Image (cartoon, grey):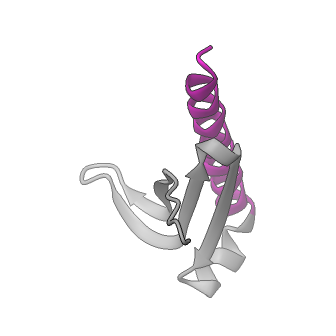
């Protein structure tokens, strides 16, 4: 007998940009970031995809800081969802 089992997963995304125009709040995308959270498994996966290698090389520290902050945000959300499942 076969049984299909499902699981709830949550997707999150972010963009690291440079040369932001203060008036329009726009910039050039350097890295797209995605994450998938699996609350029932208490885990998450993140991915960063560089869109502009030249700007990434020029702004490496800022872009990696953005990616680190994105991962922190994802982890906080994973922890919050896991606590909700536990009823805390």
Magenta span contains residue 75: yes
Work out which quarter of the rendered image holds the C terminus and state it.
top right
Q: Where is residue 21 in the image (x, y as percent from the top left)?
A: 34, 57
Q: Residue at x 69, y 47 (%)?
A: 41
| Residue segment shown in magenta | 61-88
Residue 76 vs 50, above or below: the answer is above
Residue at x 55% of width, y 24% of height = 84
**Residue 29 locus on image (x, y percent):** 46, 71
Residue 54 occupies which quadrant of the picture?
bottom right
For image coordinates 67% across by 41% down, the residue present is: 75
Residue 35, located in which quarter of the rendered image?
bottom right
Q: What is the quadrant of the N terminus in the image?
A: bottom right
Q: Where is residue 60 in the image (x, y as percent from the top left)?
A: 72, 68
Residue lying at the far top of the rendered structure: 88
Residue 12 image position (x, y, % from top left): 48, 54
Taken as a whole, is the magenta stretch helix, strand or loop?
Answer: helix
Q: Nearer the viewer, residue 53 or 84?
A: 84
């Amino acid at each position: 007998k076969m049984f299909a089992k499902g699981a709830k997963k949550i997707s999150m995304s972010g963009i690291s940009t440079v040369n932001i125009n203060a008036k329009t709040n726009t910039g050039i995308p350097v890295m797209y970031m995605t994450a998938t959270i699996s609350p029932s498994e208490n885990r998450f996966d993140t991915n960063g995809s560089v869109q502009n290698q030249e700007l990434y090389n020029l702004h490496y520290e800022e872009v990696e800081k953005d990616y680190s902050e994105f991962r922190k945000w994802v982890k906080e959300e994973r922890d919050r969802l896991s606590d909700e499942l536990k009823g805390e």
